[in-house]
Image (spheres, grey):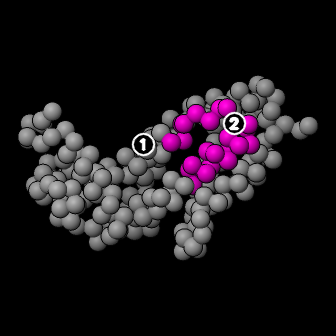
């Protein structure tokens, strides 16, 4: 399908993929729109037909990244026991941030002016889509396997712990495998929420 500008329907996707690579390699401030256009195999003018500027393009990359995170987090692991489900979800989350460290570093460290937009996107593209996870928590409560707690509170607690681990990982210079923290976090959460025997 062609747009009114004669660009293929996949052009925007190609640009976003190229932008993610360039931002990841160069950081936000050093990334040039010319380099992104070249990496995408499009003219610089085509880039501006899709995105008015570098900040808009970067935010689109972040939004797409958060949509990918949501999709991964909502993968069905219901066949696993509760403790293993927690480990799986936490490992998925931490692995995702580890894989895309440059993108998230650019948001949180390089371009702190985007922090508010990132928080809003995170809420829209992740937290609002976690209804299935909250439903799993409700089922565990009903089955008597975990304490009667507010599912959204547990979700916020887990996200807070994971973000703490991510922050510490950045401060350490990213010199260890972030996903390896999943077992420790899952055990802390599980021991805190399980029903007493």
Q: Earlier in the sequence, mark 2 or mark 1?
A: 1
**Residue 77 coordinates in the image, percent (x, y):** 62, 36
Q: Which residue position holds label 1?
A: 67
Q: Which mark is residue 190?
A: none
Q: Residues within 10 Å of mark 2 (few under 14, many from 20)?
A: few
Please, what secondary structure does the residue beneath circle 1 have? helix
80 part of magenta stretch: yes
The residue segment tinted magenta is 72-94
Foreground of the two, 24 or 159: 24
The residue located at (33%, 57%) in the rendering is: 20
**Residue 125 coordinates in the image, percent (x, y):** 45, 41
| Position of 97 relative to 77 (above/below) | below
| Position of 174 relative to 187 (above/below) | below
In the visual, does 185 lie left or right of 2? right
**Residue 148 coordinates in the image, percent (x, y):** 78, 32
| Position of 65 relative to 152 (above/below) | below
Give the main secondary structure, helix, strand or loop, of the magenta stretch: helix
Q: Quadrant of the N terminus?
A: top left
The residue located at (42%, 42%) in the rendering is: 67
Please, what secondary structure does the residue beneath circle 2 have? loop
151 part of magenta stretch: no
Whether residue 53 is visible to the viewer of this picture, yes or no, is no
Foreground of the two, 111 or 190: 190
Q: Which residue position holds label 2?
A: 80
Q: Quadrant of the C terminus?
A: top right
In the visual, does 83 lie left or right of 120? right
């Amino acid at each position: 399908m062609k747009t009114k500008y004669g660009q293929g329907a996949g052009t925007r996707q190609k640009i976003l993929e190229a932008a993610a690579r360039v931002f990841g390699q160069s950081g936000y401030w050093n990334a040039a729109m010319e380099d992104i256009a070249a990496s995408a195999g499009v003219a610089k003018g085509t880039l501006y037909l899709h995105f008015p500027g570098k900040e808009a393009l970067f935010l689109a990359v972040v939004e797409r990244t958060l949509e990918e995170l949501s999709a991964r987090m909502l993968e069905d692991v219901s066949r696993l026991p509760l403790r293993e489900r927690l480990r799986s979800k936490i490992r998925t989350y931490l692995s995702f941030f580890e894989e895309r460290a440059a993108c998230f570093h650019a948001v949180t460290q390089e371009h702190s002016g985007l922090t508010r937009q990132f928080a809003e996107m995170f809420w829209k593209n992740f937290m609002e889509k976690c209804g299935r996870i909250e439903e799993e928590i409700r089922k565990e409560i009903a089955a008597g396997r975990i304490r009667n707690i507010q599912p959204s509170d547990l979700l916020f607690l887990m996200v807070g712990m994971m973000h703490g681990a991510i922050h510490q990982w950045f401060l350490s210079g990213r010199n260890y495998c972030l996903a390896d923290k999943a077992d420790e976090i899952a055990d802390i959460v599980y021991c805190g929420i399980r029903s007493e025997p």
